[in-house]
Amino acid sequence: MTALPAPPPRSRLLPFLGQIALGIGTLAITLLGLLLITFIIARVVPTDPVLSIVGERATEAQMEAIRVKLGLDLPLWQQFFIYVRDALQGDLGTSIRTGQSVTAEIARYFPATLELATLGTIFGTLVGVPAGVLAATRPGSIADQIVRVVGLMGYSMPVFWLGLIGLLVFYGKLDWVSGPGRLDPTYDMMMQFTLTSYTGMILIDAALNGAWDVFANAISHIILPAGLLGYVSMAYISRMTRSFMMNELGQEYITTARVKGMPEWRVIWVHAMKNVLVPLITVIALSYAYLLEGSVLTETIFAWPGLGSYITDALFAADMPAVLGGTVVVGVVFVTLNMASDILYRLVDPRARA
Amino acid sequence: MSLLEVKNLRVTFDTETGPVQAVRGVSFSLGHERLGIVGESGSGKTMTGRAVLRLIRPPGRVDADVMTFDGQDLLNATEREMRALRGKRIGMVMQDPKYSLNPVMTVGRQLTEGLRLRDKLGRADATAKAIAALDAVQIRDPARVMEAYPHELSGGMGQRVMIAMMLIPEPDLLIADEPTSALDVTVQAEVLSILDGLVRDRGMGLIFISHDLRLVARFCDRVLVMHKGVVVEEVAAANLLEAKHPYTRGLLNCLPRIGGPRGPLPGLDRSGAWATEGAP
Ligand SMILES: Nc1ncnc2c1ncn2[C@@H]1O[C@H](COP(=O)(O)OP(=O)(O)O)[C@@H](O)[C@H]1O
Ligand SMILES: [Mg+2]
């Protein structure tokens, strides 16, 4: 008998927790960097925050008073410290346009984006993964060709064009879905005045309130934009799934599973899929991040009051605190998703846990 | 009656540059005995073994005049009938456990899945059987190995797990395709003797594939010598030294070393007609 190899670690949990701690550390540093960048931009951009508050005709004394009030008389490092401290406490400053807290405004807009992007990613995954698997298991077949062409269209057709066509056909001609916005005005009033808001995501809030008529109306509004984003996401996910799956099906452990007499569904959906998941998690997270950050066009076409619209509107109004606040939130979302996918990745791949 | 009967087996790959014949008319029959297949790399040994299990994937295809296992026609068997044979009655140990074990499943799950899915055993029974199988391949700490992932095992341990996995359903025939070629020289002998002992004890048929003629002669009753997809000679292991074919004699004389350079064997006289026959 030979010596046994080094024992596998007694507990797999401990190193795993260490890695999560490391991840959180990285997250903190990344966010600090992001805040530093937005801080510098805010100081460099030639919009005078004092001027935009007091107006052109203020006296020198008035301006000085505001300057002190905003802390602009302090040294830069101190201003940055205050900026970070406020941001950590959830204070991203005051919108110049509306005079309201940027955090409170984003808390209203962001759930709309989150709801749309999440539903889009769920569509994209539920359709894209099986489509990719189907294509990978029958390369060159009609099914493979269809998946390829449909995916290619999702890649190459401009989103705004697809969105407009979708509205024209399904809303304008067929009247299968509702038009732009998150709710019809009546339901919108109901949502605002009679129902409790828990998350800001209408589907969830309506369900929690048991308001199924509101829920149904919200579905009829979100289905088209979410389907559109889902299509874009599906195009990417199906293509990547196909290539990952083809690669795994060529591996020797697949032959082993077949030698053992395992049925084909198990070979594909258990043996190969567990390995496909490792890179696929990153792909799905990337696609989710893309929908969360890059759905400005969709939000514009569908009059969707989300983060993309918020940042765009703020940009046109030169509302610097709002733009930078939105940017910080986008950054936080990206970094968080990155970390979540990293944790999931380690959960499905034992080799990454060592 | 013989266990496995193969007549005029051909494996063809339809490539863009035309068909490539990996196996060109191989015939043999096998009882509950031990048949060796030797030949240099690329001579079609692996394809012969996989053809028996009908595990050649497109663009490869298998034809034969006869291919039966225990009286059952393998050529016209449905995929369902083949699945009933695979694992249960014919097992296969492949070359490198680094690739032949699923990297993201624990050893335990891979060992028990056949028992649980096919034989419908409960978790506890399946685990007990798997642990017994690990014991049989002389793994000292089977409970711990059950929890391990393949990358946590050495090559020798991995190959023992593979052997245990294939022997759990007690097949009638085991195909061992270069089962030690990827292992360190120091553990090769151990793994071979474990394999040899188990196959002998259980009286199963064995097809032992290797590029090492002397090794094959030690473990087998009969040896098929393959070259470029055809059997050039079939000899009883005991009479190996009386082999007549120049290719066989060449294999005997130049003593290929495991882990040594692949490709044409040094000192092999390829001037005879056999060396070029059937070459593309
Ligand atoms: N996918 C394939 N396409 C074309 N030819 C192949 C393919 N797979 C194997 N072959 C051919 O089959 C021949 C025999 O391979 P193999 O049985 O693996 O040899 P051995 O196991 O004796 O080293 C190789 O020489 C190769 O040309
Ligand atoms: Mg081989």
Image (cartoon, coloured by chain):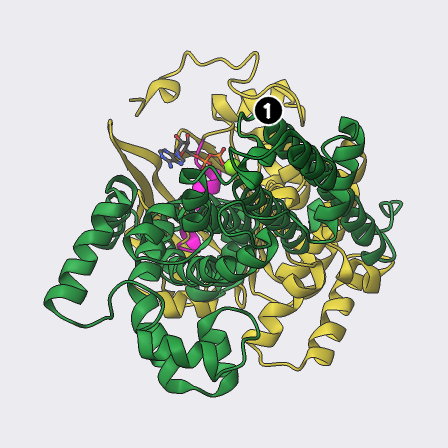
Chain colours: A green, B yellow
The residue at label 1 has a CB less than 8 Å from ligand 1: no
Residue B202 x %, y %: 67, 65
Q: In the image, is residue A280 above or below residue B201? A: above
**Residue furthest toward the left?**
A173
Density class for disc 1 (Cα within 10 Å; few <14, some 14-19, many ≥20) is few
The magenta segment is B43-54
Residue depicted at x 59% and y 29%:
A41
Q: In the image, is residue A198 above or below residue A62? A: below
Residue B113 shows in this picture: yes
Q: Quadrant of the C terminus of chain A?
A: top right
Residue B215 x %, y %: 67, 36
**Amino acid on which the number 1 mark rests in the picture:** Val
Residue A238 x %, y %: 37, 50
Q: Is residue A298 left or right of residue A270?
A: left
Q: Which residue is mark 1?
A: A44
Depth check, front residue: A227 or A221: A221
Quadrant in which residue B22 is drawn: top left
Instruction: State ligand 1's quadrant.
Output: top left
Q: Secondary structure at mark 1?
A: helix
Q: What secondary structure prevails in the magenta region?
A: helix
Residue A179 located within the stretch drawn in magenta: no
Q: Is residue A347 left or right of residue A178?
A: right
Residue depicted at x 87% and y 50%:
A7
Q: In the image, is residue A3 above or below residue B84? A: above
Residue depicted at x 48% and y 47%:
A97
Depth check, front residue: B260 or B146: B146
Quadrant in which residue A246 is drawn: top left
Residue B3 shows in this picture: no
Tag 1, which chain? A
